[in-house]
Image (spheres, grey):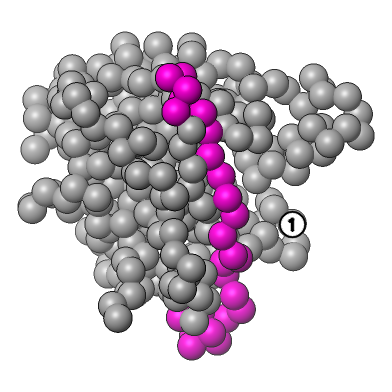
Amino acid sequence: MALPSTKCLDHIIYLTPPGSVNETAEEFRKLGFNVLPGGQHADALTENSLIILGDGVYLELISFVKPVDAYPPDSPERLARENHPWALKSPGWIDYSFLGINSETVHIFDIINSRAKEGGDDDLYGPEIPGGRKRPDGQVVKWVITPPRRPAEGIERRLPLPFFCGDVTPRNLRVPTDPPAIIEHSCTAQGIASVRFEVPSGRWDELSRRLSYVIGNPGVASADAGHEWLLDTVKGVEGRNCRLLLSRSEKESLGIIEVAFYVERKPEKEIIETPYAQIRFVPI
């Protein structure tokens, strides 16, 4: 039995301040993206909007519904909000997901942890966690998340490894592409060209090694970054590579610094600064 892919890019997450997801959706519409309403997640802590691309990858514009101090001290809701994986994240590109699976016999965490053990490392991923949200039309969408393990030193030491999202309900409920106008954008975006990470020199070896376990190959040296891996997309187009790039930094920041999109029309500006992050348009 062939093992499932562990290198298919599913979605990229853009965090905005609490309660601001609708405002952010308007900002992305002004950039030429078609933004769809998403809904509130099952934990009632976050809500989102979606930008779905022709290659099957989507952007999740997300915000917490309320700031931490809106919940009563020591309440279950307050504790859940304080311990959310993104609770300490600053707005911008904060996370990304690879496509997972929903299976009783094959598990993403087993596949990756086995690779890590062969390389002399500890387990990187924990077991699946159920997730879901209710769409504005009332449709309930369900999935399972395979998360990276939290480091013993604290969440702030977590490396930017992807989580995996495996669909329980059909993926087209989570990522609708019908009618076709859903994936049509006035900026002519077709899909993801690259996701670029900034990595401090002191954590370079650790991150590149662990990404190799996740993706299943060591990657290659890159002409426009320090290192890169080719990723799959759900609806890949021949000749349009989706790349994960690592760039060295002398700063201590660690995470996604830029997402690049393939576009059909040459843009007036190749690089655009949003209020919290950077976007690049790459003409096809």
Reading the image, the residue beneath label 1 is 154
Q: Position of residue 104 (x, y in %)?
A: 48, 68
Q: Position of residue 81 (x, y in %)?
A: 74, 35
* Quadrant showing the C terminus: top left
Toward the viewer: 65 or 33? 65
> Magenta segment, principal secondary structure?
loop
Position above or below: 100 against 240: below
Say whether residue 188 is magenta.
Answer: no
Disc tally is 1
Eyeballing the image, is 211 above or below 83? below
Q: Look at the numbered disc 1 and give the secondary structure of its residue.
A: loop
Residue visible at 68% across and 63% down in the picture: 151
Mark 1 closeness class: few <14, some 14–19, many ≥20 residues within 10 Å: few
Q: Is residue 133 magenta?
A: yes
- Where does the image place residue 61, in percent across and percent down from the top left? 46, 28
- From the viewer's perspective, tell me whether residue 42 is left or right of residue 278: right
Farthest right residue? 74
Q: Quadrant of the N terminus?
A: bottom left
Q: Image height check: is 79 above or below 239?
A: above
Name which residue type carries label 1.
Answer: Gly
Question: Residue 280 in the image: x percent, y percent?
Answer: 28, 33
Query: Does residue 72 appear to the left or right of 165 in the view shown?
Result: right
Residue, x 33% and y 51% (percent of image)?
9
Residue 158 visible at all: yes
Which residue appears at 59% of the width and 75% of the height?
Answer: 123
The residue at the point 25 percent across, 51 percent down is: 233
**Residue 228 visible somewhere in the drawing:** no
What is the magenta range? 115-139
- Figure check: 162 above or below 260: below
Q: Name the side, left or right, on which 133 lies relative to 215.
A: right
- Front residue of 95/100: it is 100
